[in-house]
Amino acid sequence: MVHCVFCNIRSEPKQKVIFSNDHCMFLQLEQVQQKGSQLEGSGVIVPIKHRETVFDLSAEEWEATYHLLQQVKQYLDEAHGPKGYNLGWNCGEVGGQHISHAHLHIIPRYEDEPLAGKGIRYLFKSEANKRKND
């Protein structure tokens, strides 16, 4: 079995569990939490049981993720004061998933960012991402 940083959170000492419930946990990497960093406040919600992608979550895990997301938003609003959020699941290698354990990215967004106002679609609509015609 491939090493999974989410199945064994002790393997990544700079990864901290901020909140958890019976089915999932909210993790943050210590090195991206500095004030003013590009990913200040960001983290991931991961199921406790190994699930390869979001499509493999049980109904209970979906509900637990929802409840934890609400708790995380309140925490981030109070601790960091973002003006927006990007949320996303990467699924499969082509979809950008580099850890084969489902994880919901939570990325607070701030008004003073150079790309403030640009959402997820901005990346996909760029000319650099244009598909090749056969």
Image: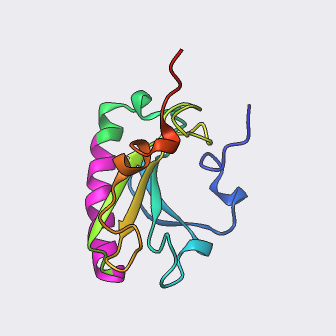
Give the colouring mode of the picture: rainbow
Residue 65, percent across and down? 33, 48
Q: Quadrant of residue 55?
A: top left
Residue closest to the far bottom: 35
Q: Residue at x 34, y 69 (%)?
A: 116
Quadrant of the rendered image containing residue 101: top right
Q: Taking the image as drawn, is residue 23 in sight?
A: no
Q: Is residue 50 left or right of residue 45?
A: right
Q: Would you say residue 79 sits in the magenta stretch?
A: yes
The picture places residue 132, in percent across and down from the top left corner, at 53, 25
The residue located at (54%, 82%) in the rendering is 34
Residue 133 location, x and y as percent?
A: 50, 20
Of residue 118 and residue 132, the one placed in the foreground of this image is 132
Q: Is residue 73 above or below residue 93?
A: below
| Magenta residues, dominant SS class | helix
Left/right of residue 19 with respect to residue 101 in the rendered view: left
Quarter of the image that includes the C terminus: top right
Q: Residue 68 in the image: x percent, y percent?
A: 32, 56
Specify the segment rendered in magenta. Answer: 63-80
Q: Quadrant of the N terminus?
A: top right
Residue 27 seen by the camera? yes
Looking at this view, name the residue that lies furthest to the top: 134
Name the side, left or right, on which 128 lies relative to 64. right
Tell me which residue sits at (50%, 39%) in the image.
Answer: 129
